[in-house]
Amino acid sequence: MTSSRSFLKSTSSLCRPRVSSILLIFLLVGVAAVMSSSSISSSTQDDLFTRHGLGIHEFNTILSSDIEHEYSTKHRKRRNLSSANDMDNNDGVDDDDEWDHSLWKSHTVQAWQNHRKLSGDRGSITFALASSSSHHRRHPRHPYIICDFRYHVPGYSTRVSIGRYFNVTDALSSSSSLQSLYNRDDKTCYLLSTTVTLAEGAVMLSSSLNGSSTNEGTTPQWAVQPLLPAMKWREGTRDVLNKLDEWEDGAGVRMKISFCPGWADDADDEHRGSIFGVHGGNFVELLRHRRELYDDDGDDAMSNEGDDDDDTGRSSRDGDDDVTDECLSLLSTNVNKVKAPHGGDNTTRLSAANTLTIDLISGNNNGNSTNTSSSSWSSIVSQCVYSTLTRLSRRHDVCGVSVVPPLELFNVEAQWITQSGRKDERPFFDVGLTGDGQVVACSDTGIDLDNCYFADSNLRGYAKSTRRSDRNRKVTQYITYADDTDYTGGHGTHVAATIVGKKINGRREDTNGAANGIARDAKLAFFDIHKNGRRDLSVPEDKIEDLMDPGRNAGAKIHSASWGSNINEYGDLENAFDEYAHKNDDFLIIVAAGNTGRTSTRIDIMKTVSSPGTAKNVITVGATQSSGQDLDPQMLGPSYLADFSSRGPTSDGRTKPEILAPGYKILSAKARPSHAGECDDSEGTMFAYGTSMAAPVVSGNAALVRQYFEEGWYPLGKGPDRRNRNDVSAALIKAVLINGGQAMKGVQNEEVITATSPYDNHQNFGRLSLIDSLPLNGRNNLKLFIEDRKNISNRRTHQYEFTAIDGCDVSDFSVTLVWNDPPASPGCKQCVLNDLDLYAKVAGKTHYPNGLNSKDAINNSERIRMIPKTNDYITVFVKAYDLDSRSQDYALVVSGCFEEGHEITDDRDHGRTGDRRSGISEGNAMEEEDMTNDYFNIEPPLTLQTEFTGQYRHDGSMFDIVAKNTIHISTLSIHTTATSSIKVTVWTKKGEMRNAYNNESSWTIILSTTVVGRGQHQETILPPFPQQVTVPSGDVQAFYVSLETEEMLFSRSGGRFGSLAVRNDDLSVLMGLAKGRKFGKSFTGWLWNGGVYYRR
């Protein structure tokens, strides 16, 4: 039995900026000696590297991929590719585990061996550290996932220490080659390309510092896992290809190749030339490039046995060398030529995020000589793409391969519904907030410019200008990226008019146009992404700046996108959107959720919100029913969700959509390109429905909110007032719209009504309502307090104080926190990297956001709504719980009925660059002192551990903890055989467990959750308790940890019940009981394997 702090306590100097590189070299000399020692066999080293890697289930918590096609036993049995492990599972995993762990281990060992073989410098660890930069230049780099398992260590501290060890010079930059994958209490993980010697050194260093290179009883600091080819296949890629024949004629195949972080540092001129090529032939050269770029040398050890004709059974190693001449010819001749924003053609386009996109189009639509039918073409290209991606996934400079579905389109009652919710009341229009002075950007199919809702006074279209032209009445910019027109009844004309359309009669504008837009006096910067005659869209998604920058340069700070792909993943496009929003904090992107919430046979289909609506820093919009002339007779109205509207959550569990707006149905302008001057009385308007129609409704309202702040209407709702002008962030506008969202009554599925509730994945924050979002003098009686671009550092807490009063026409106190999170890695399983927490205290009760009973660690938009009593003292907290970066800006919006607060008493952080505070007379902002301001010396919680060597199973453990000093217990750890998800429940009670070990009513549940077990001889740390358990000095606190299955491990011990098991200076753990399921039979003489995490 041992007791210790978290594992690397004794080596914390390695994480400090002043650590001597000489010391690190000397440490690694010892590691190299251990590594070359004859006492450690090759098989022992292989076992060491696999144990200090990631298991299948652990990997599945970090990234989504198609590894089931390679390592699922059920999938392999269908293909008759069973390994020995499929028949005789003897690695401590349940027999019904569907994963082939032996094959995973075998491929991991083979990857390490291939990396060593390709590097040609076996065991040169100390040399690599002494001259790491030159070492990187001379030796190939390979992709590895590196995880730090120290509990509750800030992600930023981990980034610093990993970056320092691996000599990542840009580790702290926003575009670092140290790519964030996961940042939670249990671990922090990154993707990094490095040499095999440095990777091996990290494993050996962690192992040696942890006691010895073969010690199995403690948790390593770092796990280092080679990125296997199967891990690089993005989830759903094979499913997309298998449905290729279902795509509509004219839709192309879009392959995406993601290069590894820092790949350009290793690329020579020949390599770069093959990647930056502008024709299909150069992409073919990428496939033919030299063999040393591949992670394996074609040996059978890394290949599966046999072939299979079933497409759904394909592995990432099937068809290894099957990129045939026919396939290469197809790739050369069927690459789509996409017009670049500033002229020229691109066929292979490399994004800022190092993602290469290759567009293939069918022979019927590419203008080439290929004369294949659609079905024949689908079959040929499916086989070809499989082989192509298989080969590319084995390159050591490639970290992701995928095929994505084609981008597609998703569509004056909406005005009053979103402004007031009262029939024909438009209070914001009434006071002059109509979008005047605002520019909104929009990407869509085109605009028929001579429609009366866009035309100039002569009812003719006007010249399409790539630069801003203020002489044009409505469309100030038109980028002809795909073409320069819209089709009859076009999607783009309808969407654009919903945002800014305003009817013109002769030389006069008509404020009563039947299809006037939401921001009727705003202007539009338009980007045409549709070529007439094609079904898919041409979006410069690999360089998202080409899509966003033109509108931004024309003055737009809002972009409306009513298009996407019907995939629910966080991918390259979401990464690009989040990156752009993160870098341009005043630019708000608003996207449609999609229309797949219902099919002909199913209703209320969850996890259907579509790309790019799965991004974090956008507003994703769902559709409600409309009202009045927009309402069909059977519809119930705007308090009901449209049945087709796509639902959340996202693949990583974030709640979507953020906000709802009318989208079923919407009257707007109709494109008639063969006519001139069409208007209300000449078929110039039409009804349409879809979330495509709801997104521009929100975009127009966002323009009104921006006008409100820019003209100085805040804080009193009076304006314009130049003294109060604010250039607000996109996060603040998003927070304002969310903060006033109104609850829905349900989803109308024809005659079936589905109940919904706030924060669920049907409605989330509810229907947009400006009158509940912003004070407007004479129209409502609402107080508003805002913080914008407020910067918070890791582990700090900001505190705001309010006192509830009478005299307002609102009863709710609503507070919303929004921040633009750094872009996550495509395929992320936990995509939020900077975890901020919002909570409020009133009358002794703590309120948590988004309808939860504890912190929200998943979303980057959080809202609390409560009904306080008069004179209630309300304290609002914003805590930087765990940041992957040094600090994070946020926006906070508070609305309700409260009196002015006191002056700020603690202003230590308010002088930071970029901190623009507003309305400080409305609340009192203070800061709670952080535990530390030294990032390099942040220590994890203290721990007291027993051991992790037991082999005997029971369902649960019950034991007493005696505090010598006052301690605050944050969580526990266990030892389990499980390597998949397991249900864990933790009970506690004050005082000894004696006489209560069978009495459930004496105990209180403090945690009920699901965790992924780390398997035998490893520590599985439970999530933090929602509230720490404080044990005063001298007191006893009992705990009971229970699993739903008999998978908790114990050691046999001769200790008596209640005798000392393990102790340190702060506490003692006493010998307790092994238990049957949920207060079942008790067994004495068994030592609980686990740890206690606490602070003094």
Image (cartoon, grey):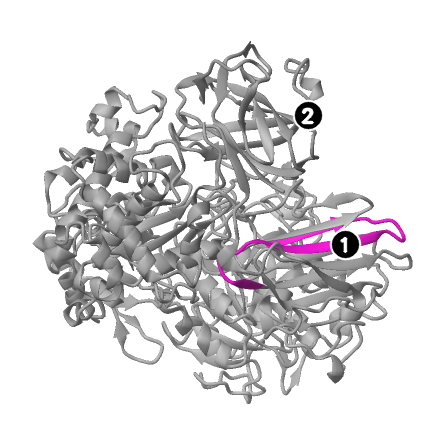
Q: Split into 4 quadrants, where in the image is the C terminus? A: top right
Instruction: Point out residue 314 in the picture as x, y percentages from the top left corner.
Output: 23, 39
In the image, residue 747 above or below residue 726: above
Q: Which residues are magenta?
A: 861-888
In the image, residue 455 above or below residue 255: below
Residue 658 within the magenta-colored segment of the rendering = no
State the CA–CA distance, disc 1 to disc 2: 30 Å
| Residue 19 falls in image quadrant | bottom left
Q: Looking at numbered disc 2 in the image, what kind of residue is underneath it?
A: Lys
Label 2 Cα crowd, 10 Å radius (few <14 / some 14-19 / many 20+): some
Residue at 57%, 26% (x, y): give it. 1069
Q: Earlier in the sequence, mark 1 or mark 2?
A: 1
Between 487 and 477, which is closer to the camera in this rendering?
Answer: 477
Instruction: Point out residue 643 in the picture as x, y percentages from the top left corner.
Output: 57, 45
Magenta portion: prevailing SS class: strand
> What label does residue 875 carry, if any?
1
Between 1016 and 581, which is closer to the camera in this rendering?
Answer: 1016
Between 1052 and 256, which is closer to the camera in this rendering?
Answer: 1052
Residue at 56%, 47% (x, y): give it. 857
| Residue 805 falls in image quadrant | bottom right
In the image, residue 105 above or below residue 1080: below
Query: Most extreme residue toward the bottom, as rendered?
Result: 471
Would residue 1 be found to the left or right of residue 667 on screen? Answer: left
Q: Split into 4 quadrants, where in the image is the N terminus? A: top left
Residue pointed to by mark 2: 989
Instruction: Point out residue 223 in the picture as x, y percentages from the top left corner.
Output: 35, 44
Would residue 951 be found to the left or right of residue 874 on screen? Answer: left
Residue at 51%, 59% (x, y): give it. 935
